[in-house]
Image (cartoon, rainbow, N blue to C red):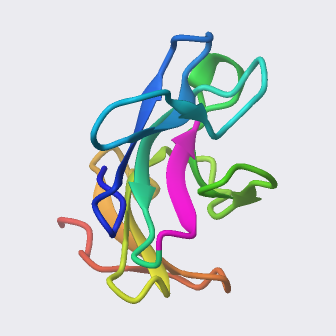
Amino acid sequence: DWSPDGSQIVFYSARTQPNQIWIIPAGGGTAFQVTTGSVSNSWDPAWASDGARIAYQYGGPGGTNLDIWTIPATGGDVSRVTTDAAQDLESAWSPDGSAIAFASNRIGSEFDIWVIDIPLPVESALVAPAS
């Protein structure tokens, strides 16, 4: 995902095992590791419109329960955004950075689109489950 100003690209890589979130200058150069830890299992980063935070999915050890987390683009303290036992993945920030949309199978086996307000966790389904 490109940074809002186009100067950097955020991506995930297992170059340090397990998957971690990295940022690299758009013109090339040295990548900066944003997330740390031996059990990170982090995927699919998405940049907030102000460039300050990155949302990503984190699976914990084994990657069995995916939730959405955020971290400052410079690294540092992470914030857990979702806590449901279902799989929450593929996050995307709203244009004003006030919410994150994500896919989740919390209603059943099908994935629906959900939205959670940032920083207050108020979730609502955008698509009603099929009857």
How many numbered discs sit on the rendered protein?
0
Q: Quadrant of the C terminus?
A: bottom left
Pick the front one: 6 or 102: 6
Residue range corresponding to the magenta coloring = 51-58
Say if 44 sits above or below 20 in the image: below
Q: Position of residue 70 (x, y in %)?
A: 62, 58
Residue 115, by quadrant, is bottom left
Pick the front one: 91 or 72: 72
| Residue at 64% over, 17% down | 62
Say if 92 sits above or below 96 in the image: above
Residue 58, by quadrant, is top right
Residue that lies at the very extreme toward the left in this rendered image:
130
| Residue at 32% over, 84% down | 95
Q: Is residue 53 magenta?
A: yes
Residue 36, by quadrant, is top right
| Residue at 61% over, 15% down | 18
Give the left or right position of residue 119, taking residue 1 as reference: right
**Main SS type for the magenta part?**
strand
Say if 16 sits above or below 42 in the image: above
Pick the front one: 63 or 71: 71
Q: Position of residue 26 (x, y in %)?
A: 30, 43
Q: Position of residue 9 (x, y in %)?
A: 35, 45
Q: Is residue 36 magenta?
A: no
Give the left or right position of residue 65, taking residue 43 as reference: right
| Residue at 68% over, 28% down | 40
Q: Position of residue 47 (x, y in %)?
A: 42, 61
Say if 8 sits above or below 35 in the image: below
